[in-house]
Amino acid sequence: MARAERTEIMQANAEDIFNVLKDYESYSEFMEGVASVEVLERDGNKVQAKYNINMIKKFSYIINLVEEAPNKLSWTLDSGDLFTKNIGEWLLKDLGDGTTEVTYSLDVELKLMVPKMISKKLVSTSLPAMMKSVENRAING
């Protein structure tokens, strides 16, 4: 099991950040390791999406997302070839000055026996880069 959480202040408003986060199919354009994301189903604020990842190895998974604009995006695992658990969320708190406090949390369990140190590193070291790429996308489009 690997858990990670990170909070940062982003130089963009919450609505712009939320719009970046819910544009799943563009993730491959700015998130390292994301080969593609396909929205399989959308029903109001509920989305089912398939993520194809190429990070150390290629794998895919399907998650069920719930969009609570503009403050929260959460998900749970539906199925996949690497995870037995993938639960997470983005929480956005508009600070009222054009900046947003952004918290990303993730709790995953892998099907493979991966040393805890390696799985923790994979989850926690990619967070700063991922959050920076989201912020850059929200600022620069």
Image (tube, helix red, strand yellow):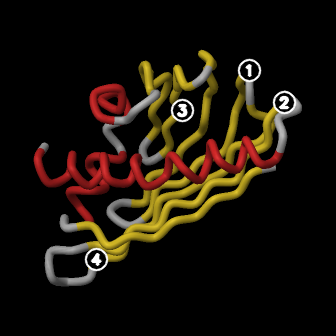
Circle 2 packing at 10 Å, graded few (<14), some (14-19), many (20+), is few
Residue at 35% x, 60% y is 69
Secondary element under disc 3, as helix, strand or loop, is strand
Disc marking residue 111: 2
Residue type at mark 4 is Asp
Measure how far apart labels 2 and 1 are at the Cα level.
Answer: 8 Å
Q: CA distance from mark 3 to mark 2?
A: 21 Å
- Proximity of marks 3 and 2: CB atoms separated by less than 8 Å: no
In the picture, which quadrant includes the C terminus? top left
Mark 3 or mark 2: which comes first in sequence? 3
The answer for how far apart the CA atoms under marks 3 and 4 are is: 27 Å
Q: Which residue type does callout 3 highlight?
A: Gln
Q: CA distance from mark 1 to mark 3?
A: 16 Å
Provide the residue designation for mark 3.
Answer: 48
| Residue at 58% over, 64% down | 5
Report the mark closest to the observer, 4 or 1.
Answer: 1
Kindly identify the residue that appears in the image at 59 percent across and 53 percent down: 124
Point out the tag, 3 or 4, that comes first from the N-terminus. 3
Q: Which residue is mark 1?
A: 81
Q: Is residue 83 above or below residue 2?
A: above
Residue, disc 4: 94
Q: Is residue 89 left or right of residue 100?
A: right
How many residues crowd around disc 3 within 10 Å: few (fewer than 14), some, or many (20 or more)?
A: many
Do the CB atoms of the residues marked 2 and 1 lie less than 8 Å apart? yes
**Image quadrant of residue 31?**
top left
* Residue 42 pos. (x, y %): 45, 33
Residue 18 percent location from the top left of the image: 31, 55
